[in-house]
Image (spheres, rainbow, N blue to C red):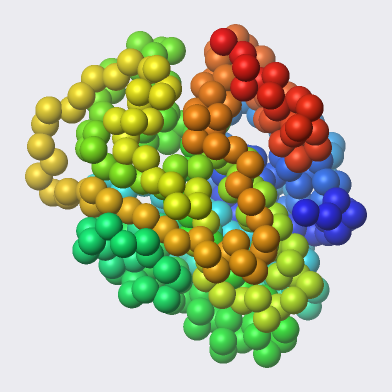
């Protein structure tokens, strides 16, 4: 990542008030970007100092990306250099309960955005964030590569796989002719502070342990590629930067801990958080037990090495929430982690990891 590259760039981020979006926005503000954020209103639990964000160069738009007319108006008005598309309905359980909203948000919302971007004259690179669930998973314990067949046995997964096909069609039909790069990032499970999603492992454990709220953990033996939000940020920012400089890097890429997937049970054990096992059987949907990603292509092209080991990612995450429940400002907690990771990892991060 080159700091000078990002200074004064206008970056459009959809879903900027969500878990990943808040971290991306925080980092790019530190890098002196001019950010245009489009999202639904943020979770009040995040308690972000929005005025502080605005002073540093953030312009907020709060509306649903399914509103094609409003979205196109904002996109044309702002005319960004770079687009990072994070907005989505991102929960499997919610997808099962609300399939129509899941499909229209993840598919129609993406179409609306890409169609609007066709009118932007300054645009150079687009990143669309998807998931490791896009693959046809037959549970053979193989590591999925980017050219493996897409699938999806539930509304969330299939809607994300559809985003991949839509992105590819827009890229080849419209953007490549203009030398605008477009990549999709298929990410493994992300852990880190500031995630308040429902029916997600870490947030559920946090609510149970810090707020005494009822929760139950299902699929203890499920194996997933877990990686920390800071490593995810590094992958997003570095790949988008490189894409801006070379549109021919357009492709789909897996990101996850290299050759490392951990079971839910192992993660909980490492976190030392209490939990309650879910004894009820899920009738409508059975989650895939195994999921492994190959990151060989991404590593070879972008030369990015993961900095946060699994055990350290758990420590960093728990430390984030401890600070949150001590009433520290969210902006400060996030910025401390960002500066430690990107600026002075070798000297400072070890102090956090050694905290008891």
- The relative height of residue 57 versus residue 124 in the rendered view (above or below) is above
Foreground residue, 66 or 294?
294
Using the rendered view, name the quadrant where residue 85 is placed.
bottom right
Q: Number of labelled discs?
A: 0
Using the rendered view, name the quadrant where residue 27 is placed.
top right
Residue 67 picture location, percent across and down: 52, 62
Q: Quadrant of the N terminus?
A: bottom right
- The relative height of residue 331 versus residue 8 in the rendered view (above or below) is above
Residue 92 picture location, percent across and down: 31, 48
Residue sitting at x 58%, y 81%: 171
Residue sitting at x 74%, y 67%: 242
Does 52 sit left or right of 264 as displayed? Answer: right
Foreground residue, 329 or 308?
308
* Residue 335 can be seen, yes or no: no
* Residue 185 can be seen, yes or no: yes
Residue 146 picture location, percent across and down: 45, 71
Using the rendered view, name the quadrant where residue 211 is placed.
top left
Q: Quadrant of the C terminus?
A: top right
Does 336 sit left or right of 277 as displayed? Answer: right
Residue sitting at x 55%, y 68%: 297
Does 266 sit left or right of 281 as displayed? Answer: right
Foreground residue, 315 or 199?
315
Residue sitting at x 51%, y 79%: 168
Residue 30 picture location, percent across and down: 81, 41
């Amino acid at each position: 990542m080159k700091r000078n590259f990002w200074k004064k760039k206008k970056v459009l981020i959809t879903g900027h008030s969500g878990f990943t979006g808040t971290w991306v926005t925080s980092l790019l503000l530190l890098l002196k970007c001019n950010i245009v954020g489009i999202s639904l209103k943020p979770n009040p639990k995040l308690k972000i100092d929005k005025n502080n964000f605005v002073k540093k160069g953030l312009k907020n738009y709060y509306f649903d990306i399914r509103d094609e007319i409003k979205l196109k108006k904002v996109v044309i008005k702002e005319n960004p250099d770079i687009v990072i598309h994070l907005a989505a309905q991102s929960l499997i359980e919610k997808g099962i309960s609300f399939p129509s909203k899941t499909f229209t948000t993840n598919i129609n919302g993406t179409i609306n955005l890409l169609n609007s971007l066709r009118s932007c004259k300054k645009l150079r690179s687009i990143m669309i964030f998807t998931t490791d669930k896009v693959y046809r998973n037959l549970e053979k314990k193989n590591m999925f590569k980017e050219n493996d067949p897409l699938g999806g046995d539930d509304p969330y997964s299939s809607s994300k796989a559809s985003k991949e096909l839509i992105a590819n069609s827009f890229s080849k039909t419209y953007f490549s002719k203009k030398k605008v790069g477009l990549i999709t990032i298929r990410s493994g499970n992300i852990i880190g502070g500031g995630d308040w999603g429902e029916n997600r492992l870490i947030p559920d454990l946090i609510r149970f342990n810090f707020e005494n709220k009822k929760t139950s953990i299902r699929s203890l033996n499920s194996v997933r590629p877990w990686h920390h939000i800071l490593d995810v940020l590094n992958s997003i920012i570095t790949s988008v930067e490189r894409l801006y400089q070379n549109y021919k890097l357009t492709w789909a890429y897996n990101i996850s801990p290299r050759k490392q997937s951990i079971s839910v049970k192992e993660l909980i054990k490492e976190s030392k958080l209490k939990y309650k096992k879910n004894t009820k059987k899920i009738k409508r949907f059975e989650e895939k037990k195994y999921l492994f990603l190959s990151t060989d292509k991404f590593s070879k092209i972008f030369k990015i090495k993961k900095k946060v080991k699994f055990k350290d990612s758990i420590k960093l995450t728990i430390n984030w929430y401890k600070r949150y429940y001590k009433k520290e400002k969210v902006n400060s907690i996030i910025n401390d982690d960002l500066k430690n990771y990107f600026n002075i990892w070798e000297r400072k991060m070890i102090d956090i990891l050694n905290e008891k």
